[in-house]
Amino acid sequence: MNNGKKKDFSTQITTWIGTPLSIWIHTIVFLAIFSLYFFGVSLSIALLILTTLLSVEAIYLALFIQLTINRHEKELKGISADTDEILEDTEDILEDTSELTEEEK
C-alpha cells in the first residue's frame, strides 16, 4: 500500500466508526456473540470471544486514530508555516505603506 492509500484507508475507518451504520453493525455483532449461548456455547466462552474482539478492535482503532492525528498535526504545521509567511508579508506591506504615507506628509 502506498502512503496515499494508507491515509485514505485510515481516514475512511475513523470516519466510518462515527456513523449510525457502525453502531448498528456493532450492536448486531454483540447480539450475535451473546446469542452463541443459545447455540450451546458456554457464556464464559462467548464473553471470552467478545472481550478478545473488543480488545483487538480497540488496538486497531487507537492506531487508526493516531494516524489521523499525526496527519492533521503535519497539516497544521504546514498551515502554521504558511500563516507565518503571510504575517511577515503583511508586516512588510504595512511598513512600506507607512513609509509612503510619511513621505507624503
Image (cartoon, grey):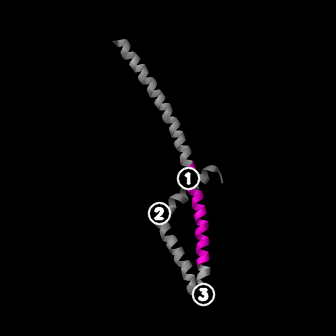
Q: Where is mark 1, residue-wise?
A: 68
Q: CA distance from mark 3 to mark 2?
A: 33 Å
Residue 42 locus on image (x, y percent): 60, 84
* Amino acid type of the residue tagged 2 in the rendering: Thr
Dot 2 lies on which element? loop
* Amino acid type of the residue tagged 1 in the rendering: Thr
Dot 3 lies on which element? loop
Q: What is the span of residues highlighted in magenta in the rendered image? A: 47-70
Q: In this view of the protein, which residue sits in the foreground, 10 or 38?
A: 38
Dot 1 lies on which element? helix
Q: Which mark is residue 40?
A: 3
52 falls in the magenta region = yes
What is the residue that sits farthest to the right in this orientation? 1
- Predominant SS along the magenta part: helix
Residue sitting at x 51%, y 39%: 79
Within 10 Å of the Cα at label 3, are there few (<14), some (14-19), or many (20+) other Cα atoms? few
